[in-house]
Image (cartoon, helix red, strand yellow):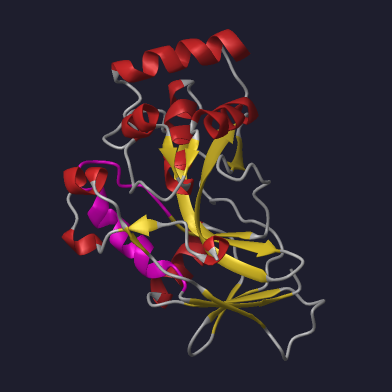
Amino acid sequence: MKKRISLFLFFLLVYTSPGFAAESKMVFLGNIEFSFIKENSQKDFEVRLYVREKAGLLKYLAEERSYNIIEKSDYLSIKNRHYSFPKEKDYKNIEPSFINDFNVELFTPIREEIMKKYGNTPEPEELTQYVNKYITNKSFSRGFDTASVVAEKREGDCTEHAILLVSIMRMFKIPARLVMGVKFFEEEEASFAYGHAWVEYVHKGKWKGADPSLLNEVDHSYIPTGTVDREGMGYTMGMIPLFNRLPYRIERSGL
């Protein structure tokens, strides 16, 4: 049952403040209704996203990404059988921020430990593995914590894994940012989808993806619906459009 529950632990964002969100448990977004497209051949890849903020998601996927979108009356249809990275090529953000606060003293021993283990210029894959092992309590007990809180508590779900990896990558001069969206899963008994968070970064001039919580390749089973670009004290207000872009129902075929 836990696998069918969204990994996002959001408050009702209109009521949040940074301090309150950091110290309180957040409410589950809820299950994403999931089914197969009956009228479509399983050989033809298609994902149908039923979303409250359809116009915002359409613009994000078609303009900021390179997804081919067909807008229907009640859903968006995607037929790209690949993950589409951002169109922008010059993302260079390696700066600390309110939520990516790797400039605090708490990160000094983390930096030293990483350099001792991997050298002065660790690879992104090594940092991803490090974050996965560093967060020892994999749970839904936290909200959307800042990186320093994650570093101190060493617990959380996908959002905590992702925010910590973004900060550690930036600490080693790798431009990175947190992405929110949907992850599909195939199992013997069932297929399902849930809200998820992962990381996009630039390495050697190319966009790449990393999932520090699942350690999976970021492929077409991931669909981004928003990027956390607002990183100041009012970051929760910037989360509202991201929240509205998350689908409440998904249909797919040919995964």
Looking at the figure, which quarter contains the C terminus?
bottom right
Q: What is the x, y in percent for residue 27?
A: 32, 61
- Residue at 49% x, 64% y is 5
Residue 254 placement, left or right of 235: right
Residue 13 image point, x, y percent: 25, 61
Can you give x and y, in whole percent of width and height, for residue 187 in the image? Answer: 73, 64
Q: Quadrant of the N terminus?
A: bottom right
Horizontal side of residue 199 vs 10, given as left or right:
right
User: Which residue range is magenta in the image?
Assistant: 227-247
Camera-nearest residue between 154 and 110:
154
254 or 110: which is nearer to us?
110
Residue 233 is one of the magenta-drawn residues: yes
Q: Tell me what residue is drawn at x 33 percent, y 19 percent.
A: 106
The location of residue 20, given as percent across then percent down, is 18, 47
The image shows a total of numbered marks equal to 0
The answer to which quarter of the image holds residue 241 is bottom left
Tell me which corner region of the image, top left, top right, bottom left or bottom right, holds residue 254. Answer: bottom right
Q: Nearer the viewer, residue 87 or 151?
A: 151
Q: Residue 53, relative to residue 26: is it above or below?
A: below
